[in-house]
Image (cartoon, rainbow, N blue to C red):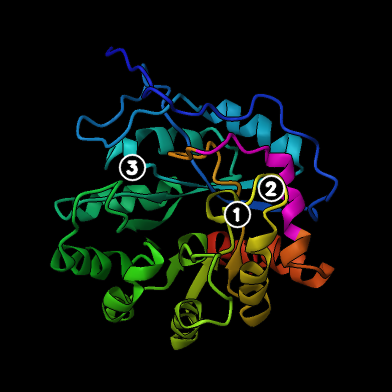
Amino acid sequence: MADFIMDMGWRVWHPSPAKPAFAPPPGAVDAHCHVFGPGDIFPYAPGRKYTPCDGSKDDLWRLRKHLGFSRSVIVQATCHGADNRALLDAIAHSDGTARGVATVSRDISDADLQSLHQAGVRGVRFNFVKRLVDSLPHDELREIAARIARLGWHIVIYFVAEELEELQDFFLSLPTPLVVDHMGTPDVTKTVDGPEFSRFVNFMAARGDIWCKVTCPERLSKETPPFYSDVIPFGRRIVEAFPDRVLWGTDWPHPNLKTHSPDEGHLVDFIPKIAPTAELQQKLLVANPMRLYWPEETA
């Protein structure tokens, strides 16, 4: 097995997060998290843009229990490329409490897509953040989208806010539900009702099957942790405008975050600041992710 040494300056995930004051409702879902390796078992991709520290499924399960969550949606990390083995191993050892969002290439067979579905994958991720991935050809993505639409999957899209104007026509042409990572990464130094974030709100309103993860205040905030108060107006606007199409997750183990190692207990305590009522919290943490990832249990 190859030896993998994490990048110089990489921030290791928090070793002892606080117990959150906010108690998630029963059945709460962490709808955006990752597993990294371990690299000696599930090697990192040769063409990766970064080498992280390991963050295993067992570490994830311990954190989930500590925070008071019941289920996880694990998103394939770019450091693993289209090798989904670490993701699939985590789902297989979750006792039915995890689903996955994979990365696939256009040469994947229909049989392999079906195998991913049987294993618990319910979507694919298209990453448009240039510091993380090389440019993605739109014709290849359209081909993948058409094939996964037959399985009832969705597409998770990750982009930077200033590129939405250029990308939104392409996004709206895709034949599957869309799930936007991290509120479309708004610039929180701008006003919540300004043109840039209003464009994102209008994009969300353009179709009834566009969802949003109101995640990662630790990435978006210009303030020191743990309060991230400059992000609150953006998260609350999305939660209140689209209460049936919002999701929340920890983003553990916080890939490529340069500023600090977030305390996940503080991130959980951010939830009632953007979803202030029990009804909104129930939708955000239970009803919505269950409908998207475990529809067979909510029918």
Which image quadrant: the C terminus? bottom right
Which image quadrant: the N terminus? top left
**Mark 1 vs 2: CB contact within 8 A:** yes
Which label number is shown at residue 217? Answer: 1
Q: Sequence order check: which comes first, mark 3 or mark 1?
A: 3
Mark 2 or mark 3, whichever is nearer to me: 2
Viewer-nearest residue: 287 or 296: 287
> Does residue 32 appear left or right of residue 7 in this picture?
right
Q: Sequence order check: which comes first, mark 2 or mark 3?
A: 3
Taking the magenta stretch, the answer to whether it contains residue 106 is: no
Which label number is shown at residue 148? Answer: none
**Mark 3 vs 1: CB contact within 8 A:** no
Q: Which residues are magenta?
A: 259-271
Q: Name the residue carrying label 2.
A: 267
Q: Name the residue carrying label 3.
A: 78
Q: CA distance from mark 3 to mark 1?
A: 21 Å
Q: Please, is residue 146 above or below residue 23 in the view?
A: below
Amino acid under label 3? Thr
